[in-house]
Image: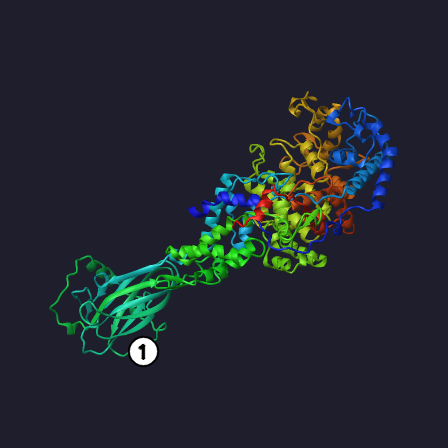
Amino acid sequence: MPILRSISLTIVFYLLSACPAATHGDERDADDLPNGPQTDATTNSSNELIGKWNAKGWPLMERLCLDCHNEDFQEGELDLTRFRSLEAEEVEKSGGQMKRVLEIVRFGAMPPEDSDQPTNAERKLLVELLDQTLFAVSCDLRPRPGKVTARRLNRAEYSRSIRDLFGMDLRPAENFPSDEVGAGFDNNGDVLSLSPLLMEKYFDAAELVANQVLMDPDDLPSLDQEHAGDQLLVHGATKTGSFTGRFLAADSFAWADFDVPVEGEYRVGVRGGNSESEASKIKAAVWDVTGLLRGVAELGYYGGSGSSQRAEFRLVLPKGKQRFYVEPIEEERDLVVGETRSDFFANIDLKIIAAALERRKQPIRPERNFDISQFPYMVREIEVRGPTEPPRHLLPPSQAKILRRYAEQRRGSWSKVAEAAKESLAPLMRRAFRGPVDDDEVARYAQLVVDATNRDESYVRGMQIAVTAILVSPRFLFRIETPPPNWTKEEAEAVRLTPHQLATRISYFLWSSLPDDDLLDAADQNALHNDEQLEAVVRRMVADPKADALSDQFAAQWLGLRNLEIHEADLEQYKSFTPSLRQAMAKETMLVFDSALRANRPVADLLTTEFSYLNEELANHYEMAGISGKHFRRIDMTGTPRRGLLSHASVLTLTSSPTRTSPVLRGKWILENVFGTPPPEPPPGVPELEETKSAGEHATFREQLELHRASPSCAACHRVMDQLGFGLEQFDAIGRFRLKAGDQPIDASGELPGGRKFDGVQQLNQILGQTESFAFAKTFTQKVMTFALGRELTPQDRCVVDEIMTKTAASEHAMVDVILEVIRSRPFQYYDRPVTDSSNPIKAKEQGTDDE
């Protein structure tokens, strides 16, 4: 496709310049949406909170924190003296740092054990004041919805879009380079670059897909074979004429063998006739190898010289070897095509076949002087041609969906190509480009089909070229959100998504794929800007099987399940850790997440759920009997040591080292994914566990960890992180339950800040479910919002997250309710006002008239 490849730089330039918006909805001012500018009352309230912080919060921070975090001694590169007076400007400048301090203090990791410790009431007061001040001041600053980035489709989105566009699961992106990850997800627009190699991959994939979703009938297997007289097999007396016609005696017959390439309808033809011009017409019966009568031809005088009469039958033939006998018939016989059977031909003596094959090896010489009355019938040729129509089972299922109309072909020339191409391409382009397309745009792609037929290529080949062009268009490869044509920068501080841009955001959030026709129809009717209709759309989409994207794209990345693909375990020690077991581990967690999502369960249920999904291999790994086969089924885990995500082999394995468990990694995973509080990086120069001084020859692993975190610089984080990890020690490095590690009994007890004691994973799960359900739901909300927006959250997004938490509190933060509120939020439905001036290439492009 050299013509298409030559425009790759043009495509990139087009992307960097502008894509016209497909349509536009009502453009309410930013003030009309939730999270808009704050009122005077709210501002006064925030001033009161700052005053309260100055009076009560700062004295606590000064007493508890400033010994290690001041201008002269900045432990962890953190100076807290700037928090002496929390004015709005200071919060805006250091909001991220303030948020981090809040998380550490709330969790109890600070102050360190060897420092002055606050009472529970003091810690609670400090957390409340930090939290309220950060929230109030940040949200007083008129939160902006965030910038918009031209995002290319990542690998999963590309393959899923191809699947849903054509109805075929082709997965062409599996050969693409891996996508970069930003803020924990591979759909982050800031890191989804476009390299020359990837551009070539896009072209290759487009051509491959086009050739798989459309098949040119000229490329299908076919049969166009004729057996002339000198190639026919004959039984009985025969003579060969000057033009190789085979003259048969009254009791003779001829046949030919064919290899039918594919099941379908074929034209079976017989050429021949009466040997004498005065004789009446003869009947020739055509039998197949089973002895079934497939046709009866009435043939008159063959015409002399190389002439002949011709009879043709349309027969549905199976794929494989076929044989047709032609038998002249003199006497009257009751023959019914498709019903009459011949025992003779059905059970023909193999010696007859062998003798005929042997005779055909000898050269056949034409004979002129023979008594033609003794050979009253002549067969010149038996032929099979077809299939007459492309067999439906050979055509891809997308063929009929794409080719809504065929161009007309007569005597090798095509007509009405543009009209047929436009009718076929318009609905396809609407889906591929995720919105309306005008006639001029459709005409440009239809012209590719016209050009192909003008080059004597087929109409279907031209459509393949047009489909390739659609799949390398920026409107397909990129999600580009630009203001509607009538928008001006004076209108508002933020731009509202057009209905079709909103539909696209929703679809790639929930399905990692393009909108379906129902969603595009809703966008056409501006229904997505109606709150009730929007909710109905979202709940329909979450119930759709395509919402499995939320488990295998969002959840798999949030929970780190993709790391299982590269996780290494010592196969000498863990021989059962096979690739299929690795896949089953991840599948279990994704199915549990998917089930909770579709049932709209509270997020915290993931920590305490008493069911799971297992197949035979994973059940054996869990030492559970009675489960067979590769199919996953829902299993009640009551009576087993497993409850919720923390007991899944996936989580337990990916948080282990190759040869042993790692309470540190497991605790870190809980901090990050449950509490939403990633621990800080370890201080420089801290050795690995193996490099620390041994606690003794017979020391348990736990005792070695105690020694490792003896340093005050380590203890602050490890005293919480390790305690969490110890609660999972009853599971080995690949998630198998155990009560001993070697000869040492497992100590899975621990204590969290606030005196929350536990012994084992079940009690740990219970404590987390009871006391940290809000933190877990908030972590889920932050992660799902990051995934939905395709960007890293900003401190100002905190206001939106907290509002979502408030709105979903009544349902205990049910998963679909959280997702719905994310979609309703200002950052999801708006983006920051773009810069538009004469120096901006986007503006310059808009003022031009260049075609795509």
Report the residue that reaches farthest toward the front.
838
| Left or right placement of residue 56 versus residue 628 in this view | right
Q: Residue at x 11, y 68 (%)?
A: 369
Residue type pointed to by label 1: Asp
In this rendering, the answer to whether 441 lies above or below 253 is above
Q: Quadrant of residue 291?
A: bottom left
In this rendering, the answer to whether 844 lies above or below 225 is above
Determine if residue 637 is in view.
no
Q: Quadrant of residue 111?
A: top right
Q: Residues within 10 Å of mark 1 (few under 14, many from 20)?
A: few
- Mark 1: which secondary structure? loop
Q: Residue 421: percent from the left, percent from the top?
A: 47, 59
Give the tally of numbered discs: 1
Q: Quadrant of residue 619?
A: top right
| Left or right placement of residue 39 versus residue 233 in this view | right
Q: Could you say which is closer to the camera, residue 375 or residue 69?
A: 69
Determine if residue 821 is in view.
yes
Q: Residue 770: percent from the left, percent from the top?
A: 78, 43
Q: Residue 159: percent from the left, percent from the top?
A: 54, 48
Q: How is the image coloured?
A: rainbow
Q: Could you say which is closer to the camera, residue 217 or residue 364?
A: 217
Q: Could you say which is closer to the camera, residue 255 or residue 843?
A: 843
Report the residue that reaches farthest toward the right.
55
In this rendering, the answer to whether 117 lies above or below 787 is above
Report the residue that reaches farthest toward the top.
693
Residue under label 1: 334
| Left or right placement of residue 249 versus residue 731 in this view | left
Q: Could you say which is closer to the camera, residue 673 or residue 447?
A: 447
Q: Residue 150: percent from the left, percent from the top?
A: 60, 44
